[in-house]
Image (tube, rainbow, N blue to C red):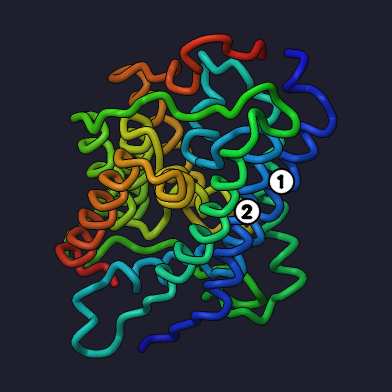
Amino acid sequence: MDAFTPVPALIGGGLIGLASALLWLGNGRIAGISGIFGQLLPPARTVVWRGVFLVALIAGALAAAYLVPGLGVGGPAGKPAALVSAPAWTAIPTPVWLAVAGLLTGIGTKIGNGCTSGHGICGLARLSVRSLVAVAVFFGVAIVTVAVTRIV
Amino acid sequence: MAISLKLPYLATAALSGLLFGAGLYVSQMVNPLKVLRFLDFGAIPSGGWDPSLAFVMGGGLVVMFLAIRFGRRRDAPLFDTSFHEPVFSKVDRPLVIGAALFGIGWGMSGICPGPAIALIAFLPNNLWIYLVAMFIGSYLGSLVMPSEGRERLPAAAPAE
């Protein structure tokens, strides 16, 4: 086991669940980050709450880093680890690698209508078949991608 | 218009965002390597696999499952006139292709949209490149498959 951390994982997951529950029972909205992010673009109809949510999400991560800096999120002084570098064997510059990853994530979550939060937490909790299929596909493809790129 | 600018509505969005961001940090999902070590199933035989991400999903799912059950007994959320249930129901090609493209991006980087936004708090090198690309990707996706109608309820969509 390489640094398996079940307790912070469960507590953090519970907080994410609580956040999703609050947004659903309070405002009737799915806490799907790709949807909230993607619909900041035209022809979005409601930008305000989405902007508030995303700014608060950044603030929440920052606040947690101050409150519990000793969790070990990979980097020094409570900061997360750096982003990945492109695998050396690909000879692709890291900025290009990350741009491609971001582009695929943006397109994929848009046409697939969701990401790890929207399909993974909210969709599965709603027992949505669409979400179950999406989760199986993106986990499966991501696992194959890691195996092929040998990025870890 | 009316509903989206009311204070309790926006305060709920803010509190939810705060908890979400804190959860991403506490669960260490803001660390791309942590995510990749879960996705690295090749490390299972050698004992180097990190199953933490499954516990994050599990913890979130249990809480949200109970909230959905509770919500089913009510007609509307506290601060809006209806639950905005996703209206698509069929497993179609865009869903599968989209999930597959996202899976490649996720596996290449160890970041998905939530952690990508949360990482703005720490500004690691190259984050902006990823975020701008994700934004452009999302825009391109909306051109390929306009899905802005997906949140609309079949009838009586609340005025926003």
Q: Is residue B119 among the parts visible in the rendering? A: no
Q: Identify the residue shown where x is 50% and y is 17%.
A: B153
Q: Where on the picture, by quarter, is residue A36?
A: top right
Amino acid type at circle 1 is Ala
- Outermost residue on the front side: it is B73
**x, y percent for residue A43:** 51, 13
- Outermost residue on the right side: it is B7
* Disc 1 residue crowd, few under 14, some 14–19, many 20+, Cα 10 Å: many
* Between A126 and B141, the one nearer to me in the picture: A126
Q: Which residue is mark 2?
A: B20
**x, y percent for residue A28:** 62, 33
Q: Please tell me whether mark 1 sits on a helix, a strand or a loop.
A: helix
Q: Is residue B106 among the parts visible in the rendering? A: yes
Q: Identify the residue shown where x is 40% and y is 30%.
A: B138
Tell me the chain of label 1. A
For the N terminus of chain B, the quadrant is: top right
* Disc 2 residue crowd, few under 14, some 14–19, many 20+, Cα 10 Å: many
